[in-house]
Image (cartoon, rainbow, N blue to C red):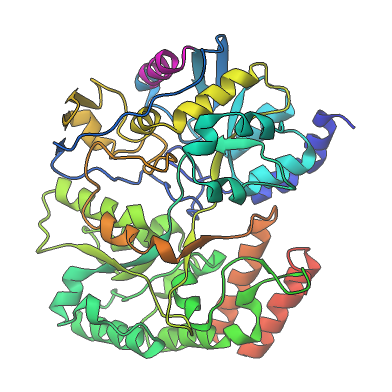
Amino acid sequence: MNNRKWLTMGMAGVLAAGALAGCGGAGTTGTSSGEAGSQTAGASGTTTAGAEKTTSKSAAASGGSVKILSGVTGGKDEEEMKLFEQALSEATGLNVTIDKPASDYDKVLMQKLGAGSDYDLVYVTASQYANLVGQGVLLDITSYVKNSDILTNNIDPKEWADITIDGKVYAGFNKKEVHRVVAINNTLMKKAGLDYKSVEPTFDGYYNMLKTLKDASSDPDFYPINAVMSDAWDLQPYFAAVGAKEGVVLDENGKKYAPYAEDSAAPVWEWFKKLYDDGLLDPSSFVDKTKDMRAKMEASSQKTAVTADWAAWVGLHNTTASAAGVSTEDYEIVSLPGLQTPDGSYMLGKGSASLFAVPANAKNVEGAVKVLEYFATQEGGELLSTGIKDHDYTGTDGNYTLTDIGATHGGDHGAPFPIYKDYKPLFPYATGVEEAMSYAKYASIDMIIPNESDYKEIVGKWGIRIIKGEVSTAEGLQSMRSELVERGVTER
């Protein structure tokens, strides 16, 4: 069966599973750690720290043209995209063109692939990657990766392991994925007489913190905690209390199951029910999307004080407030790793990979690999994060300054955290990011599954019914497990 027919048969499933994250994405669940303009550059816009250069070691430019379909990477507008293409072309010795749809990337991706468009690289999320590999529309580039000193030495082997399917890889990396933390409004904490570093990492400790925040507020519309319950994003810092990993995992017999749906997860769902019953959990959490949650966390709103979000978003909130003239006395976001696990550690969710895959009908595979190599270097990381030299920033080694336009781009042209394992940022990260990144040792990715959207829908639906008291915890968890099995997400 040819690739076109496979793609047509599986298109509906891929569209359902796709969850685009990134500056140009239409998704709202934030499944990728650079989602929605994560700002990493410090407020000063100036750095004196030198950055050791690591250039591409390819023997020679493969030449020719490379055509890329991108959801997040590149310029912020059409004019800047031309500058980005020029910079990437000059760096790789290729003629690079980037097609970046203004909206509906998931839909455009499937339309382009279904029509047999000849791209050399296409941006895909982890669930899309798994689907497309299964349909045979991506090219196995394992040998190219193994034969590339840059791809094997500049990228942590764990990253490759995360995207290996049946011993093969079909893509390279857009960026390094980071993790979600518990983000906390420290200004409101101080007003309530609380020290966030002294919060006990237990159900009772967090409950008491949230109750104190609520009692200290005179705003009837203020709820101390908001979470995107409709798709169970992101509850991992709290489910750590019972040692439950988000998503789907394998049991000792190799069968797939969802820890959040197990009876052992009941104490967490019941804790959320108590928060709801006591007026601490925002009732809008049942319908809010990520953008709504973030809007309530912003300095201009402050309708909530505790959320779970990407490490970079801690900095984004602070940078946005600073750019608006809000002082740290009036607004500051800090972070914690959540509730402790039974063994005294923590569990955080790391973002699913955002990738550049090589379609099976790519015309310039060697050129595509060369672009992937460049993305895995110091210089490539600088382009993908800080942006274009003499446009986003100026200066020489050891003394760089952001331009006005570069400051507004927040150090993100597709990769706020580049994939190069030894990357040194040209500018310091935004306030709060380093603290949030210090919890990376507790983070792990979810198993890549093609029906991720089904998982979120089912867990979110029954979780909400439990929290609202519409079903008992036991009944809700049983129904959750049954539906996950019925729809092929889990096996028990």
Q: Residue furthest top?
A: 64
Specify whether residue 174 is in view: no
The image position of residue 66, as x and y in percent, is: 56, 17
Where's the C terminus, which quadrant? bottom right
Where's the N terminus, which quadrant? top right
Predominant SS along the magenta part: helix
- State yes or no: residue 473 in magenta: no
Specify whether residue 63 is in view: yes
- State yes or no: residue 88 in magenta: yes
Asked if 263 appears above or below 123 in the picture, the reply is below
The image position of residue 64, as x and y in percent, is: 57, 9
| The one of 215 and 131 positioned closer to us in this rendering | 131
| The one of 188 and 104 positioned closer to us in this rendering | 188
Identify which residue is drawn at 58% across, 70% down. Answer: 460
Q: Quadrant of residue 181?
A: bottom left
Asked if 397 appears above or below 97 in the picture, the reply is below
Magenta segment range?
Answer: 81-93
Horizontally, residue 446 falls left or right of residue 15, namely left
Q: Quadrant of residue 137?
A: top right
